[in-house]
Amino acid sequence: DALPISTLVDILRDSDQPVFLFASGQNIDRLVTAFRACKQTERTLVTDLYTAYILDKLKAISDSLPQADWDCIRVKYWKAHAGYLVAADQKQFLFKIKTSRISMDELKTLAPKTLFLSRDNATFKQLMKHLPQDTKPRLFWSMWNGYLKKSRNVKPYADKHGIPIEHLHTSGHATVNDLKRLAVAIQPKLTIPVHTFHPEKFSTIFSDVLKLADGETLNL
């Protein structure tokens, strides 16, 4: 599910405006690619507390994942996110990364040299309200296009202001041929369809297929 870093680097180099990359905060490959592209183009990567918190927790698995206190990373605090962390007894995390916090005034100044890791929520519109009126951001949707059709924040805003949303995504979903190659390689005793619209088709492709209903338990 890797996004070619050269593609993102070219985009950042060619733009003199803030760039928004809409992606899941749990898509670690995408986060790493965004960080590396910022390093190569001397941009500031701006994340929210949710993303910073996930990366902090994953540090126990890999110390090479970007962290809030690294160079060229800043964190935008939102009241709701901070409130959730305090309620979850994670106030210490807020103190830990406080030097990485970026204010709205700083964002106004740094905006043309930033890459915002964003999601389809109200924080995007709040950011745009505080940026200079002549700001013309580049918006890149780095998720399945089906989610964009259901967008309740980003797409309505972009349509209203005439800002194009460009699709910049590499799907992690395997093709049928890839699934066949995997089955040949590992010779499974049982094949269980997951995350698919057509589980009934698996039995026409693979042997020993077991279809489970949502919520059904299988004891191995």
Image: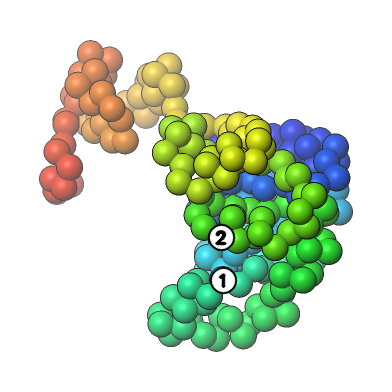
- Rendering quarter of residue 206: top left
Estimate how packed mark 2 is, as few (under 14), some (14 to 19) or many (20 or more) residues with alpha carbons within 10 Å.
Answer: some
Nearest the camera: 102 or 25? 102
Q: Is residue 153 left or right of residue 87?
A: right
Q: Kindly identify the amino acid type of the residue bearing the numbered disc 2.
A: Thr
Q: Residue at x 66, y 35 (%)?
A: 162
Q: Kindly identify the amino acid type of the residue bearing the numbered disc 1.
A: Trp
Q: In x, y percent, where is residue 107? A: 76, 65
**Which residue lies under the disc numbered 2?**
123
The reply to whether callout 1 and callout 2 are in contact (CB within 8 Å) is yes
Q: Is residue 18 left or right of residue 117?
A: right
Which is nearer the N-term, disc 1 or disc 2?
A: 1
Q: Residue at x 83, y 41 (%)?
A: 15
Considering the numbered disc 2 on the image, is that residue within a helix, a strand or a loop?
A: helix
Q: In x, y percent, where is residue 154? A: 55, 45
Considering the numbered disc 1 on the image, is that residue within a helix, a strand or a loop?
A: loop
**Which residue lies under the disc numbered 1?**
78
Q: Is residue 122 left or right of residue 128?
A: left
Q: In x, y percent, where is residue 12? A: 80, 42
Q: Quadrant of the N terminus?
A: top right
Q: Can the viewer see residue 75 in this picture?
A: yes
Q: Can the viewer see residue 85 in this picture?
A: no
Please determine whether, in this image, residue 99 is positioned above or below residue 15: below
Cα distance in 3D space between marks 1 and 2:
8 Å
